[in-house]
Amino acid sequence: MMLQIRLIGLPLIASTLLLTGCFGDDQQDLRQWMQEQRNSTKPSVPPIPEPKKFTPAGYVNDVSVEPFSNQKLAQALKRESTQATANAALVAPELNRRREALEAFPLDAIAMVGTMQPKGVQMALVRVDKLLYQVRVGNYLGQNYGKVMKLSETELVLREIVQDAAGEWIERQATLQLQEGSK
């Protein structure tokens, strides 16, 4: 046991002696060398270039219209209204035509329950309030000016005309799917 303590203690004593040797005055020449290097090194910073001189441009009022005048505003509003009427003419509901019976109901109240082809003309059967109606391509239904554009055995495709948030008329497509097993 005594031998084990001596073996462990010997390396401990040797490492302690080595560490105390590192903290002597031998670092004085290292500090002196660092100071010499600091004194001999001169930083080279390029000078900041002179700022460019700003020459303001003068306002010369030519014959042009003042940007905030009533005349300029009237021109802009007139130009905008002509564009809006041109766009409205392209997409707008036909307000002057006679409304059909199925236009009084919303699309979610209308159910497609079947199709038929009398004399080669494709027709869809739709049910509203327990009543059946025949619908062909070109008929209107729904409250958003929905016009039937295409009929198939399984669906009825509509083109609706609605107003967006800006109040302009836009087109969107809606479909009614065949309701199988509906009563």
Image: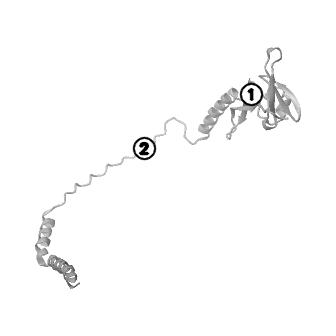
> Is residue 98 depicted above or below 21 in this figure?
above
Q: Which residue is depicted at the point 73% across and 31% down? A: 175
Q: Position of residue 31 (x, y in %)?
A: 14, 72
- Residue for point 23% across, 55% down: 47
- Quick check: 133 above or below 52? above
- Please give left or right for residue 125 compared with residue 154 in the image: right
N-terminal of the pair, mark 2 or mark 1, is 2
Circles 2 and 1 in contact, beta carbons < 8 Å: no
| 2 vs 1, front mark | 1
Give me the residue at 41% from left, 44% from top. 57
| Residue 10 shows in the view | yes
**Which residue type carries mark 1?**
Thr
Secondary structure at numbered mark 1: loop
Q: Which quadrant is home to the C terminus? A: top right
Q: Which residue is mark 2?
A: 58
Task: Give the labeled residue for mark 1.
Answer: 154
Q: Residue furthest front?
A: 1
